[in-house]
Image (spheres, rainbow, N blue to C red):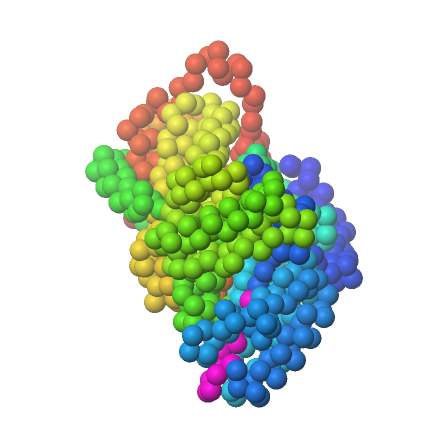
Amino acid sequence: MKTLGRWCFTHRRVVLVLWLAALVLSFAASKAAGTAFSTKFTLPHTESSTAISLLQKDFPAVSGSSDQIVLATRSGTVKDAAVEQRASAALKQVAALPHVRSVLSPYAATGAKQISKDGTIAYATVTFDGQVGQTPKDAIDKVIATAKTADSSQLQVSLGGQDIEQVENSGSGPSTGIGIVLALVVLFVAFGALFAAFLPLLCALVAIGIGYSLTGLLSHTFSVAEFATILGVLIGLGVGVDYSLFIITRHRNAIKGGKSIEESATLAVNTAGRAVFFAGLTVCIALLGQFALGLSFLYGVAVSATVTVLLTMLSALTLLPAMLGFVGEKVLSRRQRRALAASGPSPEQYGSFWYRWARFLERHPVLPALTAVAVVIVIALPVFTIRLGLDDAGSDPTGSTTRTAYENLVKGFGPGFSGPLQLVGELKSPSDEAAFASLVQKVSTEPGIVSATAPIVSPNGEVAIANLFPTTSPQARQTTTLVNHLRHEVLPQAEAGSGVHVLVGGSTAGQVDFAHKLSSKLIPFIAVIVILGFLLLMAVFRSLLVPLVASAMNLLSVGAALGIMNAVFEWGYGHTLFRISSTAPVEVFIPVLMISILFGLSMDYEVFLVSRIHEEWTKRRNNTEAVTRGQAETGRVITAAALIMILVFASFALGDDVTIKQFGIGLAGAIIIDAFIVRTVIVPALMHLFGAANWWLPRWLDRALPQLNVEGADSDAPREPELVTQ
């Protein structure tokens, strides 16, 4: 690391040119190639995927994803001549667009059931030639624009369905700009120097820009969800600014301690840079660990997030020391530069607040630890009623085309109409057609079902399909219960003796299967992440208790974050504050991504805190003094870094997309818990209580573990800081 830091400093012009060239070239390549984002659900060995396979094989005309064009009159009915003429012309144009397999119009001979009883609302079904998430964005945009040509003072046209929703809810709005401004304010307050405040943001934004472009290019090689770019910006801003903050803090302290600009930059990369490298790799390992879940939907998101984290880490280790060479002593404030010129080098003085707080925990560790643990447990309690699922258009922003379409369908046909269930039957003989029709009629009378469509048989006579319309919305708990009830109780009884095997499929059933499959793997995934963290920290700090406490604290932080998310989105707390229009389950894939990210971030803070404590322990062999000094010296930096991430993540909660809101609120809540309660209260208090046992490790295990030097012992380390006690 020392060689890397010195080379980047002395060859700063080369480093800057290389990074700027990478930014320009990646942007140009992405612009030329375009993007091919898609949200592809592959759920092997599930009932919904089996149903899709049957339809693709024997009934391809109905196997594609289906969206709706919803017509709602502002006056009169949809059967009025002017309305019908205008709407029919637009629907005919939509049917001729690329990737549109068919359009079933309410004005067709078989479309009577697609008009509400009062005649004010109707819908057309648009079937694409691919599954959900496979239709190109440009094709969907053309469908939206073409359908909207029918909108008039008499007719309101809106569009709904999963493909439409994915295209409409793909922007971050002003969240990115707000996050950058808030981060800049915190950095300026923390450093008191304009250049020191701008450098972390500059390095992070260069890395994020490259990552954003590379994510677009990666979308051509495998399935990458549209929101992966927003997630990359969110993570990149958070970790990128943090990584640079740690290095700049060490650099500034070394300058004030008498080092030259080059020596201090080299030292910062060799010490704090090692912690950054370690933290960045742990985030990447945790993100790529999602491949073990076997769900292709997460692969693209994991890879794109990993690329962004790697780039922010490399930017902090290479571009930052180069920029420090350009800035020179201006990384200090004017007051600090004047003091350095007038009085000469002096040890960094840490504020009295953190020293007093560290001494307070030293004298009274039990009560603060118990209180803090109790607070985190109370915050985490809602996790026991958490419901993981996939949100529907009822959670979309008020006024959006998908939300308007959803509300009009609910008004005209009922809440479950936007997410019908498909009954897919395998027919072995012509007599099975009558048996399937009888079964559909019987199932349609079950509680929770409004109606069913007439069965449609494939041209080869081997598959039949019918739609069931639930009384509840796709994201409702009752709909999940209904799907399970049909599969495990109703259909087995109805099939008995009929010779027909029936599957429950469709997008809503697919969402239920996805939620169940991912939920079943969540606990093992958390276990793997926690065990990995335990082993890494044990190797770094040569201790059993330190990684054991860290693992337990990670679980507490995760539990509290999920508890906050459930309280906000399912229980309805803070809906006005966060501009959330309705209750919704926690998106089933968010905990997996959030745990991966939180694992790396909490490891970052843990390493930064405990490595400083471990350094003092190695020097003094006095656990009490080591914990107190380590906490006093790192408290300000950890809380400043955490505050930046909290503000960045919270700013994304101000956007319209509910998925990004959940990421923002969950991660902001997790960092608040982890940095301001766990690392500043619980961990140091427990380390005071455990005493020298913190650093015990069996000799045989010590010999077996690899030596990992995170802080980078350096003979040129800066002079020991002074603790201000007055």
Looking at the image, residue 222 sits to the left or right of residue 707; the answer is right
Question: Does residue 376 belong to the magenta stretch?
Answer: no
Q: Residue furthest top?
A: 700
User: Can you see residue 89?
Assistant: yes
On the image, the x and y values in percent for residue 512 come to 47, 47
Q: 380 or 704, which is in the foreground?
A: 380
Q: Count the labels in the image.
A: 0
**Residue occupying the point 47% across, 76% down:** 121
**Residue located farthest toward the front when viewing the structure as drawn:** 431
Q: Magenta stretch containing residue 71, yes or no?
A: yes
The answer to which of 502 and 255 lies nearer the viewer is 502
Q: Does residue 629 appear to the left or right of 138 in the view shown?
A: left
**Residue range highlighted in magenta:** 68-78
Question: Where's the N terminus, which quadrant?
Answer: top right
Percent of width and height locating residue 245: 52, 50
Q: Give the residue displayed 43% in from the left and 64% down from the top.
A: 394
Residue 599 higher or lower than 410, as above or below: above
Q: Quadrant of residue 206?
A: bottom right
Q: Residue at x 46, y 87 (%)?
A: 75
Res. 19 in view: no
In the rendered view, would you say 234 is above or below 552?
Answer: below
Nearer to me, 714 or 710: 710
Where does residue 548 sit, x and y in percent of width and height?
39, 27
Above or below, comparing residue 475 to residue 628 in the picture: below
Q: Residue at x 41, y 50 (%)?
A: 442
Vertical position of residue 136 compared to residue 692: above or below: below
Instruction: Give left or right: position of 689 versus 516.
Output: left
Instruction: Give the image location of residue 580, x and y in percent.
Output: 39, 64
